[in-house]
Image (cartoon, grey):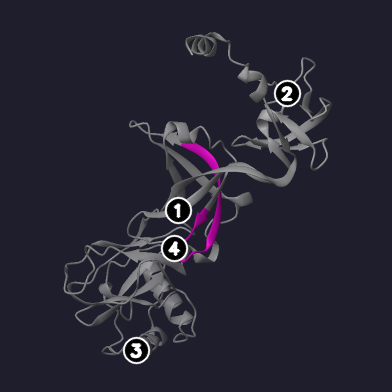
């Protein structure tokens, strides 16, 4: 018994590395790609475009943040009197009545003409026909038709129609206005989009990387990494643009909240998905001449071209479907 035990302990074990140096895996049809899941942030850049001149209590707010408005739209009411948006480069600063002239009168005439109230020339001269048009306009608003326009009745902005937002800290039901508040901000065609990432993550997102974004209603948006901006805390903003200059959110940009940054789940495509003949990347063997081969179960080498690799798998060309290849190719 003692001799048997000694023999068991002292006899060298069989070389397990020979038995388990490699295995064989069949080449299959499949896909290879890689992505990471991160958030995309959407933020609107708000630009002040109009000021309030009405004084009193805000009795109603008539638009929502991000809503597109046209000339003649009522933004809010002060003491039950509508405050109407109109187009013009000159801000409202004085009451307008018959006998006055100026660029602001011309802007008023343009508003009245667009609403079908005024048929005369837009000449900046407040005459009888302008007075008549103002009275008709005032009647349509449900206010006293006296033919004079108060400074607080209009907010002139440079371009219409446009998407705007009101400063909800100032213009809210029950708030008191004194005149002069900058309350109307304009929105660009779409918000700015960026992916906040660590330095390591940003290294995986070079310019041109595709980012698939899930919008607020489940819609799919696509952005492309355009540049990166690092802050003092080592957080990197990977800025996105639309594919070939197109809008990222298209005609659904209005679903992005205006008053604060919005976060959307996203898939960052670090390696585009490719279909083809798939095998483990460990089956690939680089030769001294720069070629790449795989070795089949008969020890025959097959020259292959690697199409793409990710997550330990590769798509290749140059070997037949079903061929069993050595993994790892070196046998180590």
- SS label for mark 4: loop
In front here: 42 or 329? 329
Whether residue 15 is in magenta: the answer is no
Nearer the observer, 298 or 328: 298
Between marks 2 and 3 in the image, the one whose residue lies nearer the viewer:
2
Q: Which mark is residue 100?
A: none
Q: x, y (%) of residue 279?
A: 70, 37
Q: Position of residue 309 (x, y in %)?
A: 66, 35
Q: Earlier in the sequence, mark 1 or mark 4?
A: 4
Q: Main secondary structure of the magenta part?
A: strand
Q: Residue at x 47, y 40 (%)?
A: 238
The residue identified by callout 3 is 135
> Residue placed at 25% from the left, 81% from the top?
81
Residue drawn at x 45%, y 66% as measured from the top left: 254
Which residues are the magenta region? 213-228
Q: Quadrant of the C terminus?
A: top right
Contact? badges 1 and 2 (CB < 8 Å): no
Label whose residue precedes the other's in the sequence (4 or 3): 3
Q: Are marks 3 and 1 in contact (CB under 8 Å)?
A: no
Tell me, yes or no, whether the two marked residues, 4 and 3, touch with CB atoms within 8 Å: no
Q: Secondary structure at mark 1?
A: strand
Q: CA distance from mark 1 to mark 2?
A: 39 Å
Q: Which mark is residue 285?
A: 2
Which residue is labeled 1 in the image?
265
Front disc: 4 or 3: 4
Q: Is residue 227 magenta?
A: yes
Q: Is residue 146 above or below residue 150?
A: below
């Amino acid at each position: 018994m003692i001799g048997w035990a000694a023999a068991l302990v002292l006899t060298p074990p069989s070389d397990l590395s020979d038995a388990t140096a490699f295995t064989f895996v069949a080449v299959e049809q499949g896909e290879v790609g890689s992505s990471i899941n991160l958030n995309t942030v959407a933020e609107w850049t708000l630009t002040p475009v109009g000021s309030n001149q009405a004084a009193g209590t805000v009795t109603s707010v008539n638009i929502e943040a991000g809503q597109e408005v046209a000339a003649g739209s009522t933004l809010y009411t002060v003491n039950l009197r509508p405050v109407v948006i109109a187009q013009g480069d000159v801000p409202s600063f004085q009451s307008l009545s018959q006998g006055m002239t100026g660029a602001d009168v011309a802007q008023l005439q343009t508003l009245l003409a667009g609403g079908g109230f005024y048929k005369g020339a837009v000449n900046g001269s407040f005459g009888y026909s302008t007075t008549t048009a103002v009275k008709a306009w005032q009647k349509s608003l449900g206010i006293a038709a006296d033919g004079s326009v108060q400074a607080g009745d209009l907010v002139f902005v440079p371009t219409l129609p446009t998407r705007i937002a009101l400063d909800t800290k100032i213009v809210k039901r029950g708030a008191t206005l004194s005149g002069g508040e900058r309350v109307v901000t304009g929105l660009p065609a779409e918000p700015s989009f960026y992916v906040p990432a660590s330095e390591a993550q940003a290294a995986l997102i070079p310019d041109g990387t595709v980012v698939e974004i899930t919008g607020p209603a489940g819609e799919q948006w696509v952005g492309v990494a355009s540049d990166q901006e690092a802050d003092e805390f080592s957080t990197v903003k990977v800025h996105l643009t639309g594919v070939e200059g197109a809008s990222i959110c298209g005609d659904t940009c209005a679903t992005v909240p205006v008053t604060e940054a919005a976060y959307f789940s996203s898939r960052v495509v670090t390696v585009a998905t490719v279909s083809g003949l798939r095998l483990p990347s460990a089956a690939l063997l680089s030769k001294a001449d720069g070629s790449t081969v795989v070795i089949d179960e008969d020890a025959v080498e097959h020259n292959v071209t690697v199409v793409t690799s990710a997550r330990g798998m590769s798509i290749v060309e140059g070997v037949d479907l079903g061929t069993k290849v050595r993994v790892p190719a070196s046998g180590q």
